[in-house]
Image (cartoon, rainbow, N blue to C red):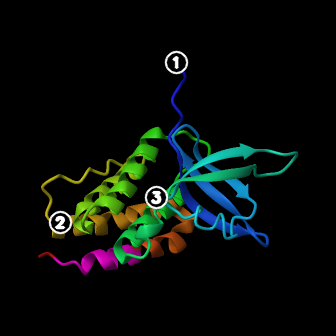
Amino acid sequence: MEDPSPPPFIVCAVLPHGETGAVVRLLGAQTGLVAGYVAGARGRTLRPVLIPGNLVAAEFTRRGDARLPSARVELVASRGPWLAEPLPSAGIAWACALTAAALPEGLPLPAIHTALAALLDAICLAPSARGWARALAGYEALLLREGGHGLAPRPPENEDWPALLARLDVQGPAIASQLLAERRRDVMAARAILLERLKRIGSD
């Protein structure tokens, strides 16, 4: 019996490079966070494929002394339909930006890949942010624990909305200082946008 195909990569970040290409950072279950150069990434064909949160199949090829391997990607599942919604788009943007900035490259972390995939599914499938905000808080706590930065507790199932928002507020400084270091200013801006939108929901 053949081994099943590995889970798809999760697009975490896309940085324009050159006239039409980009350096992409993908999270794989077996590879951890990996970076590669995608030629034509900003063209009409690949631009909708390389959206943070999308699931892709990827092949990497290293040529000569190039610092980064070249990557070929194919779309497996798109988060594009949810990017027009303010809360889901902010949740996807923050989860992917945090992952790309906080994880070391080349270290397999299958539990984090599984958790991020589940979080992204929750953001897209839950009827409202109340259905996925707890999963988001739990994912942040997982990254803090896996990074060796204290024992951030998992949010309890019966935690009410104001308490959950307070938990997210408390976790923010730890994420900024312990996970993001010098990149906190740029990356935490995405979290600020998300929390502002979550707090508009109120406690009703």
Q: Tag 1: residue type?
A: Met
Report helix, strand or loop for mark 1. Answer: loop
User: Which residues, given as a range, are shown in magenta?
Assistant: 192-202
- Disc 2 designates what residue? 163
Which one is nearer the viewer's eye here, 79 or 135?
Answer: 79
Give the amino acid at mark 3: Gln
Of residues 72 and 132, the one nearer the viewer is: 72
Residue 128 sits above or below residue 71 on the image: below
Q: Nearer the viewer, mark 3 or mark 2?
A: 2
Whole-percent x, y for residue 26 in the image: 58, 52
Left or right, 30 with reference to 198: right
Is 39 colored magenta in this rendering? no
Look at mark 3 in the image and give the residue it sits on: 178
**Marked residue nearer the N-terminal end (2 or 1):** 1
On whether residue 196 falls in the magenta region, the answer is yes
For residue 48, what is the image quadrant?
bottom right
Identify residue for label 1: 1
Disc 3/disc 2 C-alpha distance (Å):
23 Å
